């Protein structure tokens, strides 16, 4: 027997999305403390929705919970970035290959690409870019594979936001997205998979060329 996941209460969902947006826009920097009482006052809610939102964000990898430090925004360094992108390299190209071979619709990917080009701020662009990738890997025919990639989406967005703050590269990435979509729509499964692989592999190399340097040192991104 399977059970549907418990719906997140509306106040918790509101707080969760608000905190996530602040993280992805740099209003909350890597390593910054997330104090429940302060956030509750800012959002006009009790501490309970804030606490539940922080637990959910910890589960997605955007927040770190510590017995001694409490909740903080996750730090981003080359090691963390490579871990996240290594998972994507292992899974995403194959998922896209399967999507193309199945002849699945990629209309949502085209829409996401347009939204990314028109985005007014890095958070909107990051969300649109995530939607683009998701629209290509989710119809792969293997729901488990899609869920595994979903689990690293927020962490990948945090990495890209920190990297963009240090050295904006979304124009190059947008061009790469356009080429990936062209190959997908042409039905070139292997070509699309290779383009996705190259796109993912090149990002961390461009963003974190120094290996272990902590990118969050550049993260006063206000």
Image: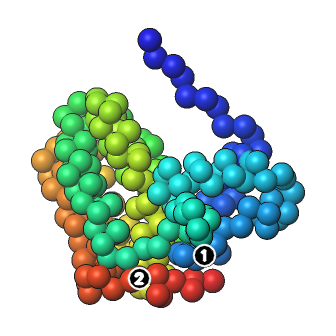
Q: Residues within 10 Å of mark 1 (few under 14, many from 20)?
A: some
Read off the residue under disc 2: 215
Foreground residue among 184 and 83: 83
Quadrant (top left, top right, bottom left, bottom right) of the N terminus? top left
Quadrant (top left, top right, bottom left, bottom right) of the C terminus? bottom right
Place residue 101 in its image quadrant: top left
Determine if residue 59 is in view.
yes
Q: Residue furthest front?
A: 68
Read off the residue under disc 1: 32
Q: Residue furthest left?
A: 190
Which tag, 2 or 1, sits closer to the chain's start? 1
Q: Which residue is painted at 47% across and 73% down in the image?
A: 75
Q: Which residue is painted at 46% across and 81% down in the image?
A: 216
Instruction: State left or right for residue 178 relative to residue 6.
Output: left
Foreground residue among 189 and 79: 79
Is residue 109 placed above or below 27 in the rendered structure? above
Q: Where is residue 47 drawn, in percent x and y? A: 79, 53
Foreground residue among 160 and 66: 66
Instruction: State left or right for residue 184 relative to residue 218.
Output: left
């Amino acid at each position: 027997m399977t059970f549907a996941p418990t719906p997140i209460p509306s106040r918790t969902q509101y707080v969760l999305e608000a905190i996530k947006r602040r993280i992805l826009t740099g209003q909350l920097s890597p390593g910054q403390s997330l104090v429940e009482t302060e956030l509750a006052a800012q959002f006009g809610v009790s501490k309970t929705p804030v606490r539940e939102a922080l637990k959910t964000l910890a589960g997605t990898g955007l927040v770190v919970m510590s017995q001694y430090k409490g909740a903080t925004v996750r730090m981003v360094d080359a090691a963390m970035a490579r871990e996240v992108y290594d998972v994507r390299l292992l899974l995403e190209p194959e998922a896209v290959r399967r999507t193309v071979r199945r002849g699945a619709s990629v209309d949502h990917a085209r829409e996401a690409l347009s939204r990314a080009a028109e985005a007014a701020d890095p958070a909107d662009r990051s969300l649109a870019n995530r939607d683009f990738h998701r629209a290509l890997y989710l119809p792969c025919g293997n729901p488990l594979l899609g869920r595994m990639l979903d689990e690293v989406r927020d962490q990948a967005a945090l990495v890209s936001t920190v990297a963009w703050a240090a050295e904006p590269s979304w124009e190059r990435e947008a061009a790469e997205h356009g080429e990936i979509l062209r190959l997908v729509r042409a039905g070139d499964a292997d070509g699309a998979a290779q383009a996705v692989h190259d796109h993912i592999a090149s990002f961390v190399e461009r963003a974190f060329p120094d290996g272990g340097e902590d990118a969050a040192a550049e993260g006063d991104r206000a």
